[in-house]
Image: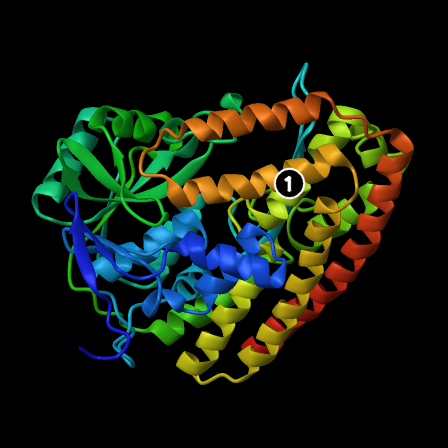
Amino acid sequence: MRAGAVVLCTVNGVVMTKQRKLKDLIRARMEKTGERYSTARLRILLSGVGSGGLELHQAAGYLFSPGICRDTGAATNFLRALGVRDSATGEPLSEALVTGLSGGVGFLYMVFEYTGLPPMLSVLMRYDTSADQFVIGGLKRLGLDLEIKETTSAKAAEKSLEEAIGAGCPALCVVDSVTLTDSLMPAMLKGMVPTVVTVTGEQGGELLIDTGSIGPVRVSRHEFAAARAAFKKGKHRMVTLRGNPDLADLAGAINGAIAGTADRYTNAPYKGYASNFGLAGMEKWHRLLTDPKDKKGWAKLFPDNQAACLGLRRAYMGIHHEMTPPGGGRGVYAAFLRQSAEITGNDRYLLAADAFDAAGERWGAIEDAIASCGVLDVASGCGLLDEYGALLDAQQDTRVPAVTDLKGRLDALTASSELDHARALEIYSDLAGMLGEAIKCEKAAHQRLLDALN
């Protein structure tokens, strides 16, 4: 047997390697480096350890490799199962490459206000804030002969899925994540939070789906149909491969994706929201953190106690967890740019990669400052959010009782918050200083992209 070969065994119909489990590798790194769970997890997966030392799962010829992000992880496994390869190397596309092709990084600052509820902050660090558009946009950019089906009929959608399963074809489906899984998302967002998962087959009357976790998640057909139907804008969207898996112009796809990312930094995707996206959105957040007079400033929206606690934790969630790896995903985008330099022959992408690594360090400093601010309900809440990531890695079912318990603990921390106004303002001022440094790095990284494209 060749060195580094993956040794497989079968357990309950699912093939697993006799190598180290992801959580063991993560815990060992955490003890060594002091990193948080998600950060240690990212470093391990970016290092490529999955190809040689990580326990992997396989079912019906489909290899489950844990995703750096859940949706791009599922999409990367989907492409591997279809036989999509880099024609120059013969290797499957990495998740960093898939992420970059989908647009990679971006920025959104938005606060939603609902009657009777604290303001809900969204800080999102990706090119597109809708997971289905993000991932499927990347697949389209590859130029593959894909069949993308949409229908408002649940019956027609189920028939198309059954045909794919019967033919042994993996199918990438758009679902509502709040409906499909136990989630930390508020119940009021049900039907509004799309993601993508891959249906890989069936076993014992249940569907096997790839959620970007470490193995297949089992779900009943009824539950899966409900999750597809819940996100009405998705129209039961399903993606399969119609023709051959050959890539016509990977270098061209990469250059086009990078041009789109650079454009998004200065041009909002939706009319009327120019101040919320890209560099303008970052500048807006920077100003509102310390503006005492603006009614949308943090001094008024998140003055103290519950509101302040939620605002800080949501900021941490957006930079460290929500649709992004730690550091706002800048390190993953840097990895994409380094691969892009090799594929396209454009060495200027290497300079851009260094700049995005620097930006990632600044965003990492912000998330660390929030998690270690010394306020119990904020710091402990961030710890529980990290614990949620570990629960997702262990899930084999869409319903995880521990998630309900964790959500209750988060709610209890929020309700008992005693973060006073003066201390909240001090934290906001500190964050504003660090955000200013992050913005400088973001501007430099954006300029590096423009230089590489010209």
Residue receiving disc 1: 382
Report whether residue 71 is seen. Answer: yes
- Above or below — where is 179 with respect to 137? above
**Residue 131 x %, y %:** 44, 44
317 relative position to 219: left or right? right
- Using the rendered image of the protein, determine whether residue 454 is visible from the camera's viewpoint: no
In percent of width and height, residue 410 lies at 61, 28
- How many marks on residues? 1
Q: Is residue 42 left or right of residue 400?
A: right
Q: Is mark 1 on a helix, strand or loop?
A: helix
- Quarter holding the N terminus is bottom left
The type of residue carrying mark 1 is Cys
Residue 157: image quadrant is top left
Q: Is residue 289 above or below residue 5?
A: above
Q: Position of residue 89 (x, y in %)?
A: 29, 80
* Camera-side residue of 21 and 166: 21
* Foreground pick, 64 / 269: 64
- Image quarter (top left, top right, bottom left or bottom right) of the C terminus: bottom right
Q: Which residue is drawn at 30% across and 24% down?
A: 226
Residue furthest top in the image? 116
Residue 34 at x, y percent in the picture = 63, 58
Left or right: 5 in relation to 390 = left
Q: How crowded is mark 1: few (under 14 residues within 10 Å), some or many (20 or more)?
A: many
Q: Is residue 288 above or below residue 80?
A: above
Direction left: furthest residue: 166
Tell me: 217 left or right of 343.
Answer: left
Residue lying at 83% horizontally and 43% vertically, measured from the top left: 427
Q: Which residue is drawn at 14% across and 38% down?
A: 203
Q: Which image quarter: residue 93?
A: bottom left
Q: Which colour scheme is used?
A: rainbow
Q: Which residue is drawn at 51% across and 25% down?
A: 405
